[in-house]
Structures are given as C-alpha cells and as structure tokens.
Image (spheres, rainbow, N blue to C red):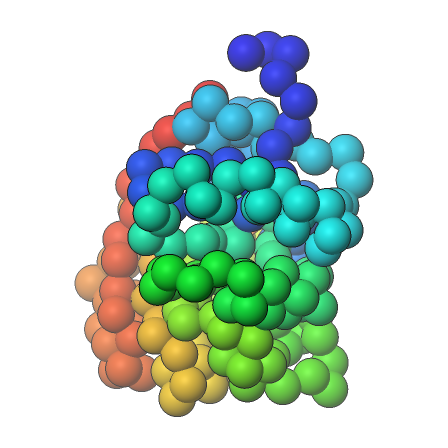
Amino acid sequence: MEKEDPRIVYSLGNNLYLNITNKCSNNCVFCFKNFSKGVGGSNLQIKEEPTAATIISELIEKINSKNWTEIVFCGFGEPTERLDCILEVTRWIRKHYGKPLIIRVNTNGHGYVLNRNRKVIKELKEAGVDKVSVSLNAENERIYDLVCRPKIRNAYQSVVEFIEKAVKHLEVEVTAVSLKEVDLQKIKKRAEKTGAAFRPRQLIQFFW
Ligand code: SF4
C-alpha cells in the first residue's frame, strides 16, 4: 500500500473519481492533503498534472468495469484550476459512454476567479456536466478566511456568486465541513435561499 503509485482515476462505492490536479486556491484547515496521502486506499499525491489524453486512457480501462452512478472530478486539488481539461474529458465521456450517469464537479467555487473571461457554468453545462458540489464551508467571509485560508481576494463572495450562477443551469449541492468554527444551520439557510441543496460533511472520512 505504501508504495502504491498515485492515482488519477479511483473509485469509492459506485462512483468513479478523477484526480486531475493537486493545485488549489485555498488551503483549508481540514483539507485531506494536510493529513493523509490519499482517500479510500488510493494515493492521490500526483507528481504532475495528467493530460486529458492520459485521463481518458485510464478511464477507458475502468469505465466499463461497473455501472457507475457518478463520475466525479474530485481529488487533492481544485478541478477548475484545469477547466479545459474538465471540458475535454467530460465531452469524451458523453461521446463514448452510452449509459446514463451523472457527471459532477466538486469545487471550491473559485472557478470564475481562476478562469477570467470564461463562462464557466455555461461551458461545464454544454460539455455535459450535470452537477456541482460547492464547498462553501462558512456563513460569512471572516469564518471562510479562517477555515479555508484562501489565496485569492474576495474568495467568499466569489463562491457565493458561483453558487448563484450555477443554480440557474446545473444541479447544485452546497457542502460545509462540520467544524466548531462554523454554523451549519446558517450555511444551510444561505444555500437553500439560492435554490441549492445542502449537505453537511464530517471532518474525517475515508482517510488513508
Ligand atoms: S478547497 Fe478542497 S482541495 Fe482546496 S484546500 Fe480546501 S479541501 Fe483542499
């Protein structure tokens, strides 16, 4: 296990996950990569970002091994750091995989800051993404800066705006990690006001 090569494509239950980058515009106090080298027994510490072609070739090996419920862009970094890669891989899945499944992006919601002048939500939708799971993690900017330690300015506001745009085109789930610093009820209210669903997350799960 200790010597297992880093994984780009990994699975948990009925979902297939794509670990496309280790870069992130946050440095959350609870981030898995601060405590472990992987999730669910898969080493996610990739040394370099895989090309879309590499991701697709790994997908070809695994995509028909099960009837997957979802394919999720989620790993040790923020997927929208590589928007074009998400779009290319998603288009490939939609073109080559005939069975119905949900394609989801787990994101910190900084997509518009990381991709200036792009129509991020519209582009995701057009490529074939169904759903985004957005980590809001705080009821206000002060708490967000404390727990997510963003590397960009106005980060909290950019997440809120991302959610407001996303609910117009995609299924949206807002998440928050259960920490003593945050008020989950206030976050839930804020999420539901935008029309998004809310899912609290436990701090430790599937650690390796
Ligand atoms: S947004 Fe996600 S990947 Fe980025 S630091 Fe926070 S938990 Fe880690």
Which residue sits at x=60%, y=64%?
92
**Residue 176 sits above or below residue 9 on the image:** below
Locate the N terminus and report the quarter of the image it occupies: top right
Q: Position of residue 48 (x, y in %)?
A: 79, 40
Q: Position of residue 120 (x, y in %)?
A: 60, 79
Q: Nearer the viewer, residue 48 or 204?
A: 48
Q: Position of residue 14 (x, y in %)?
A: 32, 43
Q: Quadrant of residue 2?
A: top right
Q: Does residue 109 appear in the picture of this structure?
A: no
What residue is at 72 percent from the left and 46 percent from the top?
54
Looking at the image, is 24 positioned above or below residue 47?
below
Left or right of residue 142: residue 24: right
Residue that sits furthest to the top in the current view: 2
Vertical relation: 68 (above or below) 191: above
Regarding residue 114, the answer to whether it shows in the image is yes
Rendered image quadrant of residue 192: bottom left
- The residue depicted at 69 percent of the width and 62 percent of the height is 85
Residue 55 picture location, percent across and down: 66, 48
Q: How many marks?
A: 0
Quadrant in the rendering for residue 37: top right
- Compare residues 71 and 135 and report the one nearer the observer: 71
Between residue 17 and residue 183, name the one nearer to us.
17
The residue at the point 61 percent across, 32 percent down is: 7
